[in-house]
Image: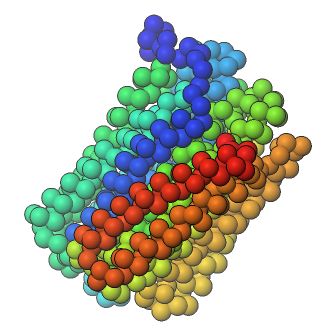
Amino acid sequence: MAPSTVTVLEDRPLTTTARNSVTVAVWTLVSRATGLLRVVVIGAVLGPTYFANSFQAGYVVPNLVFTLIAGPVLAMVLVPSVVRAAGTGGAARAREVFGGVTGWLLAISAAVVALLMIFSPAVAWTLTFGIPDPAARARGLWLATLLVLLIAPQVLLYTLLHLGMAAQQARGRFALAAGAPAAENVILILTVVWAGWYYGTGRDVEQVPVDLVVALGVGSTAAVALHAALQLFGTARVGLLTRPSMRWRQDPEVREVTRRLVRSVGVAAGPAAAMYVLLALAGSVPGGVFVVQLSYSVFYSLTYLSARAVATAALPSLAHAAHRADGATFGSQWRQGLSYALIASLPLLMLLAMNSVPTANILANGELRHAALIGPLATCLGVVAMAQLVGGVHDIGRRALFARLDDRIPRRASEVAFGVTLLAAAAALLLPADGSRLIWLVVAILASELTAAGTVLTRLRRAIRPERFLESRALLAALVATVAMAPVAVTMRWLANADGGDRVANLALLVLGGVVALSVYVLVLRVAVRQIGGGS
């Protein structure tokens, strides 16, 4: 790109963490709402079948494979590096570093796509081994193999779009990066709805035509391609879109970034592998992948609306402070970010924990509307309510460590968390292949996040001494506000139980009650902050 087109990279003040957090949260709400709708629509159209299990676990394989390469760690490593490069060498140097990392990652991703296609039968086997009938399992294996072959190129597309997201975040631009996934979700939703209309709903592997698998695979890849194009447009807007460089070995700074990415593979690979293990085991229960995947979707949706939104917005400021070796500013930014994260997560915990049953009743639709799934889903959502707070704190903690160029502790936290997941998954096999197994698989998510958060926060506490670790008065104000909204949440639950389970009424009640509860929370929080002091 010509130099005249990148004046946007000239230094400018970064907006506040609070404003950026709101931007990320608002656009993430759009993306995650459509993502949640995507899971619900797929479940409603495909039903509680083994083919639905295979597709729901299969279409996320490219994203999980990319996560094994870099995943969310890409932004954690690349954003501080681009910030430092721009601070020392200006816009041109930032583009050089970004272009070098892009070339290296695309080369790695192309090789991974080839490997994924070669080993597609093995991947397909993990998606279908839970089918009890041998003939159905053999056909399911063939269909899943075809699906994996069709979606394998998405690994390259995910690499491009995550590079674009990191570039925008490094320059303090968050709206398009957070909102563009909605386009991907909408295209996939339309594809599934069309497939259900044309081929019929609730088909299992014996009745699924090859054309249906091709339509779903091509539609899924087209959706990711549109998402990647939008993120590349955002990269161009901030002036970082440049030709990928194949000369990363000649640039010491790029080599250091790639080494940190390689060292940090475990940070991304652990959660991705854990998710895959849990989804594979959920495939042993008809409709089980829907329950576990929906639980994951709600988990990530809530964390990205709250703590992860704060963490994403705070990373550039933390990286600036760490680059200047300004311990006081770093400590202040950390306390502010942690306070915002807890303030945003606590009301979501209260609302979902108290209203998990009507929420599950709303989310189970179409072919998946069975009492055998709604009950376990409600319990899983109650577990997710706590997991989203713990997971959000874990995320902001590891981003703070990455801002300090510390990838060792986040890597160790991921490894320990993965070990906890494997132990829980092994224990799940001892349970009957019904709702109890699904609940235990979701408990594994909470257990792993607790382990990871404890590991990260312990190290971070030592790193920022003698600065204070926590703004206790802000946390106390948030707790007071959460208790104040509890009566509204309890009333919502009582009314939902009293109306006989009508889903339209429940949805209206949850929306209206949620607005009232959050309004109470905000008002009491403002008063508590003034009375207690120390409000961020």
Q: Relative to 377, is 469 on the left or the right?
A: right
Could one spot residue 479 in this view of the protein? yes
Could one spot residue 119 in this view of the protein? no
Type of colouring: rainbow
Question: Picture coordinates of residue 322 (x, y %)?
Answer: 76, 33
Q: Relative to 164, is 214 on the left or the right?
A: left
Residue 506: name its quadrant.
bottom left
Q: Is residue 250 above or below residue 137?
A: above
Q: Residue furthest right?
A: 466
Of the pair 81 and 389, the residue shown nearer to us: 389
Q: Is residue 249 above or below residue 424?
A: above
Q: Relative to 303, is 403 on the left or the right?
A: right
Question: Picture coordinates of residue 284 (x, y %)?
Answer: 41, 82
Question: Picture coordinates of residue 337 (x, y %)?
Answer: 66, 44
Q: Residue furthest left?
A: 198
Report the residue at 48% width, 74% height from top. Answer: 490
* On-image quarter of the N terminus: top left
Question: Picture coordinates of residue 35 (x, y %)?
Answer: 36, 55
Of the pair 200 and 302, the residue shown nearer to us: 302
Residue 513: name its quadrant.
bottom left
Q: Is residue 313 above or below residue 503?
A: above
